[in-house]
Image (cartoon, helix red, strand yellow):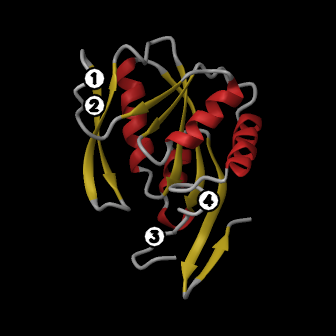
Amino acid sequence: MLPGGVLKVGSFLNQQIDTVFLKEMAKEAGRLFAGRPVTKVLTVEASGIAFATAVALELGVPMVFAKKHPSANVSGEQYYAPVYSFTHKTTYIISVSREYLKREDKVLITDDFLANGNALKGLISIVDQAGAEVVGCCAEIEKGFQGGGDELRGRGYKVESLAIVEKMEDGKIEFRR
C-alpha cells in the first residue's frame, strides 16, 4: 500500500506482468462471462491492455482500447468520454474510433482496477454512444470500499472482480469473501 489509498501491484500486474497469473485470470474471466454473447473486449490504455488482451484471447474476440491522449495515427470520427483517474488525480478525455465499435457489438468492458468506477462509466458511455450493448464488466482488482462496483451493479450491470479489497488500513489489506 502507498499513501493516499494506492495499492501497488506493479511487480505482477502493471509494469511487470506475471504472464502465468495473467493467463489464469483470463481463464477465470472467461468462465465468469461464459454464455454471454461477447463480440469485443474494451478497456482503457495503458494498464488495462494486458488483461483485456488476455481475456479477448480467451474468448476468441477482438480487443479495443480507448486512448487517453490525442494521437496522430487516429483519424476519423470518434466516441469520447471524460474519465477521472484516482491514481493520477487528473481527468482524461478517452476516445475510441467509431470504426472499432458498431451497433451490433456485445461488449465486455475490462480494467485492471475498479475503484470509484470512473473508467468503467466512461467506457460504458462510449459503448452507449456506439449504440452497442454492454454485456458485463470485469476488473482484476476492485476496491470495494470505494463503491464503484456496487454502484454499477445497482444500475443493473453484471460486474465481476477477480479480487475485491474490502479494507486498506494500518498497512493491512482485507478481502471481501
Please give the name of the residue rendered at 71% of the width and 30% of the height, measured from the top-left corner: 58
Q: Check the image and report above or below for 172 versus 70.
A: below
Q: Give the amino acid at mark 1.
A: Val
Q: Check the image and report above or below for 27 versus 139.
A: above
Q: CA distance from mark 2 to mark 4?
A: 31 Å
Q: Are marks 4 and 1 in contact (CB under 8 Å)?
A: no
Provide residue 17's location: percent of width, then percent of height: 60, 52
The earlier-in-sequence mark between 1 and 3 is: 3
Q: CA distance from mark 2 to mark 3?
A: 27 Å
The earlier-in-sequence mark between 4 and 1 is: 4
Q: Give the amino acid at mark 3.
A: Val
Q: Which label sits on residue 12?
A: 4
Provide residue 8's location: percent of width, then percent of height: 52, 68
Apparent side of residue 68 relative to residue 103 in the rendered image (left or right): left
Residue at the spot of label 2: 80
The earlier-in-sequence mark between 2 and 3 is: 3
The earlier-in-sequence mark between 2 and 1 is: 1
Residue at the spot of label 1: 74
10 Å crowding of disc 4: few (<14), some (14-19), many (20+): few
Residue at the spot of label 3: 6
Q: Nearer the viewer, residue 170 or 177?
A: 170
Q: CA distance from mark 3 to mark 4?
A: 15 Å
Please give the name of the residue rendered at 34% of the width and 23% of the height, measured from the top-left corner: 129
The earlier-in-sequence mark between 3 and 4 is: 3
10 Å crowding of disc 1: few (<14), some (14-19), many (20+): few
Apparent side of residue 41 relative to residue 58 in the rendered image (left or right): left
Q: Give the amino acid at mark 2.
A: Tyr
Please give the name of the residue rendered at 29% of the width and 62% of the height, measured from the top-left corner: 89
Q: CA distance from mark 4 to mark 1?
A: 31 Å
